[in-house]
Amino acid sequence: MRLFLLLFSLLFCSYPLASDGTVVKVSLADVDYAPYYFYQDGQLHGVSVDVLHRVLSDIGMSPEFVRRPWTRLLSETSLGRQDLIMVLYKTSERLQQFDYVMPAYLSDKIALLCFKPCTSAFDGSLDSLSGMYIGTIRNNSYGEVFDSQPGIARQEVENEELLFKLLGLGKLRYAIASEIRFDWSVKAGNEARIMVLTPAIDRAGIYFAFGRQSHVDKDTRQQFSLSLRQLLHSPDYLAILDKYNMQEYRVQPD
């Protein structure tokens, strides 16, 4: 009997608030992803974290953060083991697995990076990349425009840290990356070796996305979306962007 009670207690203590619907399980990658989310002095910070806390507080909910490798993160959230991903580009394939919260809360630039000297001309057209080897991250989206472009030879690596490292060493000549992530992660100290080519390949919205099998019900998701939309029209949103110096990535929803 005591063993049964112990097992019963452990089972329900593992997910203390999930049954009453007040907690949203939020998936984070197992490496920091500044400026969206990152640990500093033992505390979780980031523009996505600040926006999420503001929205969840407004609808009477709170987050429970879970860290996973990126591929596992996508799988577990799509299967309902976690509820929400904070940073996700929208693709037709992912629309089958995830319920994107509208609207996007940031607008990122998808940039082509090159190891200097850049030997190929780039005018913003993806056709000019045909036949070139471009470094990308496995299982990562770079927006519908690049994802659907034929004729580009993708050199896939496991994670962004490795992508930027190989590019900085000249092991990759070109790579596709989020301009936000490049600015925050590797721009300082690498400008002599890596160049961001202009114009940007695309602009892609940054979305919150619920797994379609999440325990968070439809009404709550609608409340989340409404609260997010109200935040994007408020001075609080501008203050969050100012905090992380991200004004140029602001969205202006209808």
Image (tube, rainbow, N blue to C red):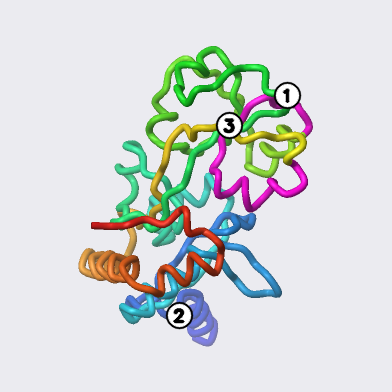
Q: Quadrant of the C terminus?
A: bottom left
In front of the other: 45 or 192 = 192
Q: Nearer the viewer, mark 1 or mark 2?
A: 1
Q: Which residue is mark 2?
A: 16
Instruction: Using residue 5 as the reference point, say whether residue 134 is left or right of it.
Output: right
The residue at 32%/65% (across/down) is 215
At label 3, the amino acid type is Leu
Q: Quadrant of residue 52?
A: bottom left
- Give the residues drawn in magenta, as a range: 169-190
At label 1, the amino acid type is Pro
Magenta-drawn stretch contains 186: yes
Q: Is residue 216 visible?
A: no
Q: Quadrant of residue 30?
A: bottom right
Q: Are marks 1 and 2 in contact (CB under 8 Å)?
A: no
Residue 173 percent coordinates (x, y)? 68, 24
Q: Which residue is mark 1?
A: 117
Query: Which mark is drawn over residue 197?
Result: 3
Q: Residues within 10 Å of mark 1 (few under 14, many from 20)?
A: few
The residue at 44%/67% (across/down) is 25
